[in-house]
Image (cartoon, rainbow, N blue to C red):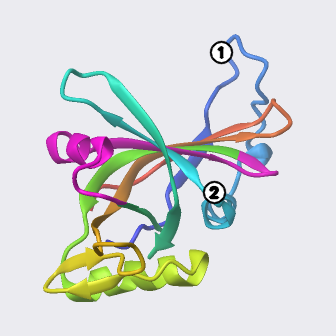
Amino acid sequence: MRVHTPVAELLFGEGDATPFNTDVATLKPWRLALACVESAHKCWLSTVGPDGGPHAAPVMVVLVDGAPCIASRPPSRKSRNLAGNPRAVITVSSDDLDLVVSGEAHQVSGDTALRRVAAAFATKYAWAFAIRDGRVYDESLPGSPQYAFYEVSPVRAFGYGTDGLTATRWRFSRT
């Protein structure tokens, strides 16, 4: 899925009792959010457990067509959670932005898509995955464990400036 540039808007308005800046000139561009994800060594992935409780775990993240993608072992808690409920949140910080991306995570399938995500992991982390018969393996580890790639399709995102006074909400169209 290609992620299109979202609509940016202030998180808080003039009538809100908040210390946040309400000047539209302080809106953060989406490219700053993409740079935050791209430069991050890791981020936090939050999922919903079978009991409805939250689960958070650090993961490595890459961007493919503007969508954050992560790798996870199928038996892991995060993979099992995503199989039962695709809602997910990715949080990450940079020197310029604290970012929260809320959306739905879906397992990437098809050799072409899997190879694109694997190439992104190889480029960013030098983490080489093998793709065989529509499955992902890390052959550098004993037993060549299987992995799954998940793409988080953003629904909305929030960017908070490091000044503590600016906040941007991005809304994504669902196409």
For this rendering, which residue is in front, 80 or 12?
80
Residue at label 1?
Answer: 16
Residue at the image point whose x is 60% and y is 60% from the top? 37
The residue closer to the viewer here, 156 or 81, is 81
Q: Nearest the camera: 1 or 91?
A: 91
Which dot marks residue 33?
A: 2
The single residue placed furthest to the front in the displayed view is 142
Contact flag, marks 2 and 1 (Cβ < 8 Å): no
Residue at the image position 45 percent from the left and 83 percent from the top: 128
The magenta-colored residue range is: 72-97
**Residue type at the position of mark 1:** Asp
| 165 inside magenta stretch | no
How much space separates mark 2 and mark 1, taking CA atoms? 24 Å
Image coordinates for residue 165, horizontal then vertical, percent? 81, 30
Q: What residue type is labelled 2?
A: Ala
**Residue 77 painted magenta:** yes
Name the quadrant of the C terminus: bottom left
